[in-house]
Amino acid sequence: MDERDFAALGPIVAGVLEDAYEKQKVFDEDYINPDDGLLYCGKCHTPKRRKAKHPFKPDSEFIVPCYCKCEQETEDERRRRKEEQERDEYIHNLKITSLMDDKFKSQTFESFRTTKENEKIFRLCKRYSDNFEEMLKNNQGLLFYGDVGTGKTFAAACIANDLLNRKISVVMTSFAKLMEKARSFKADDEEVSRKLDSTKLLIIDDLGVESGSDFALEKVYTYIDNRYRSNMPMILTTNLELSEMQRTNDIRYRRIYDRIFEMCYPVRFTGASFRKIEAKKRFDAMKTFLEGD
């Protein structure tokens, strides 16, 4: 069969092959190999065309364009760069829609300041993130509780950013922000609710800061119950003590906490407040600067 005689292949196949021939670049240094009659690359000396079996006549062959070795390497690199760019853009868009405050977007496990008090917590958070697919499958979340400034939000942000960098959708916000949205335009609240329900991991900061109004507590329950019913995990942080949550007699809080205890493994954060430590460092540095010799 002649190299460009595609009529017997049908109009669609013939059109595709004709287009491939038109787009194939042939340079002056390229040559026909006398051993097989195929076009070869003058740089890498590998075939730029190959023989293919006829789709309707098993005993017949025809010649089609193909990548030589150096063209294939160039194409592989182009695809790699494109996939990397698409991955970076996808992660960037995930971070935009994550609702995370800018101050938490740079927090990573690499910047996690481990101490004697939080070393175990660091390992727990890293293990949770590394095994997130299993956590997702089992609808297993976490409840970070403890004093103000002990690193609960920071630890949650480390998990969020680690997952986002692996192209796993995460939304991280606070109950205060959710209450603000809930009291604003209905469309805003509905849009946020869709994001909360669709993300693979939902992280909500500062449980307990919302007001005790029936409206606020009903919204909190709805956010948590939606995750429960959709079998999707969540991470919550709170300054409340676990015993305080367990002993409440208020039925409005009771049903919220029961859902949380069913879904989330409690992790206590202890130690000195990082905020107070940082504040003291800034105070001492300023004192030295102003009062020094």
Image: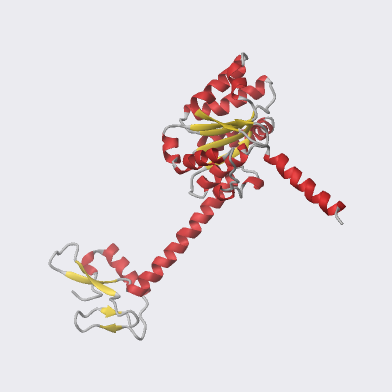
Residue at the image point whose x is 57% and y is 29% from the top = 223
What x and y, as percent, mark residue 206? 64, 32
- Is residue 255 toward the left or the right of residue 74 in the image? right
Q: Position of residue 168 (x, y in %)?
A: 49, 45
**In the picture provided, is 199 more to the left or to the right than 45?**
right
Q: Nearer the viewer, residue 288 or 145?
A: 288
Q: Position of residue 114 (x, y in %)?
A: 58, 44
Image position of 89 (left or right of 216):
left
Residue 100: percent from left, percent from top:
62, 43
Residue at the (87%, 52%) spot, across then down:
291
Above or below residue 20? Residue 243 is above
Q: Image check: 86 left or right of 74?
A: right
| Viewport quadrant of the C terminus | bottom right
Residue furthest bottom as drawn: 28
Residue at x-position 60% and y-position 16%:
247
Q: Residue furthest front?
A: 293
Residue in the picture at 68% in, 37% down? 273
Figure quadrant of residue 271: top right
In the rendered image, the vertical position of residue 273 relative to residue 208, given as above or below: below
Does residue 93 appear in the picture of this structure?
yes
Q: Is residue 199 visible?
A: no
Across the whole image, how many numbered discs are drawn on residues?
0
The residue lying furthest to the left in this view is: 59
Corner quadrant of residue 277: top right
**Residue situated in front as seen by the camera: 24 or 1:** 24
